[in-house]
Image (tube, grey):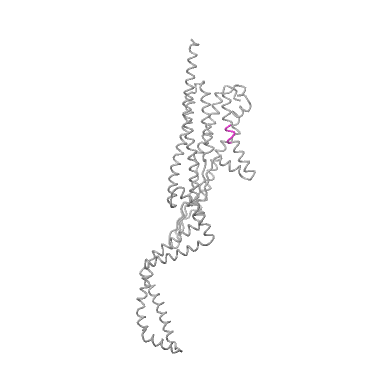
Amino acid sequence: MTAEKQPGSIKGFNVARLLLILGLAVLLCGEGYFGYRLHTLSKQQEALKTDYANVNNITLGLFSVKQWRDKVSGIVNHQVRHFTLTAKQKKDLQIEVEQIIMALINKAEALLEKKPKSLGGKLKKLAVKTFVHTDKIKAQVPGFAKTIIAKIDNPANKNKLSNLALNKFAQAQQTGYLDSTITASDSVTNIMYHKYRVSSPEEFNDKLTASLDHIRAQTYNYCFGMLGCVVIVLALWWILRKRTELHATLFIMSLFFAFLLLSVGLTASMVEVDARVGSLDFRLLGEHVVFKNQVLFFQSKSILDVVEVLVKQPAVDSIAVGALILAFSILFPIMKLTSTGIHLLSKKKIAENKVIKYFAFQSGKWSMADVIVIAILMTYIGLNGLLESQLSSLNIKSDALTIITTNNTALQPGYIIFISFVLYGLILSTILKFITPHDAH
């Protein structure tokens, strides 16, 4: 009877294992897709924020000669074109213009009273006194003054004055310093405007902000999708906890999920440092001048990015730190995952190999992946607090000046994936100790 059931049991086991492999393979493909999309969107987000930071950098805004030239010329243009005289100002100006005209007439009279020495001079004096009556001219002075004031307040003349004032600003561009800074600023903005097919700073910022909001929502969706796949795997361990014949297959498939978590966690952005002056508002020549979104500093890094930056430094200590992070937080976890699979599937001789057993069961104390997770978290908390403190000290609110700073430093989905890998790896290590057919010590 037993002999008759055995083929059926083997067949049932093979079917169950095949279904398990197929189901987990589909789930693994889903996790791989989520991870690929998260990684891709993370790089897109970093590129967009870098471009945003470059265009809105404080050196091209608040510290830019071009920005100041445009704002000041706009103020001058506006004030000249929209200059108006109040009734009191017109009355005061009327008196001053009349006084100036009267002074000119009096000066002309004084010149005429001088005794001419030549015959021609005597004839001219006689002609002027005969045909020019200064009393009548003086009586017309108020009318002359009103005509002059009307000419000044004429819109056409205002435009001429505005153009004259703006021409003075244009002449300032001829200096070498202005030319170099304006050329550098224009070069950056023109490249970015052409890249994103926009024509103004407002359009550029609105377009990138909308894109970043959309990408941020998508990255978190894919992040939670990856975590959902891992949760399903852990749920299968609970469901199949009594099916010991399937444990080896389930464990090997579980390792593939861990490898995907690790690869995305290492390459996706983990933390962004973004400090900026959100708004700077002050009065210049009686009008408001506003600078918005002035980026002071921006960096977005993954663990691999940090390693790359460190090992490329000329200092030996930086290279050493980069090598340590590479070895203990990247290579050790990979060796550990690989060794657990080899230990479980191999024959006793290979499974009991000291190197395999060491990486499978004892390398955890040397792996710094969990330490890196805590270090990044503490760095984020400390840096975030430091930036908040430093930026808040710049906040000023008064009638003359208003400065509002913002700290957009934040942990990214890459951090969530990496910490999930660490926790998932600890769970798999615990499971291995229970299901291994070999000595776990």
Based on the picture, tell me whether residue 426 belongs to the magenta stretch: no
Residue 435 in percent (x, y) is at 54, 23
Q: Which residue is the extreme one toward the right? A: 316
Q: From this view, report whether residue 317 is shown above or below residue 182.
A: above
Q: From this view, report whether residue 304 is shown above or below residue 398.
A: above
Q: Which residue is the extreme one toward the top? A: 1
Number of numbered discs = 0
Residue sitting nearer the eye, 198 or 209: 198
Q: Residue at x 49, y 36 (%)?
A: 36
Residue sitting nearer the eye, 72 or 237: 72
Residue 440 in percent (x, y) is at 59, 25
Q: From this view, report whether residue 379 is shown above or below residue 255.
A: below
Q: Main secondary structure of the magenta part?
A: helix
Q: Quadrant of residue 441?
A: top right
Residue 177 in percent (x, y) is at 54, 59
Q: Which residues are magenta?
A: 329-334
Q: Residue at x 40, y 77 (%)?
A: 101
Residue 206 located left or right of residue 335 = left
Residue 414 in percent (x, y) is at 51, 38
Residue sitting nearer the eye, 16 or 121: 121
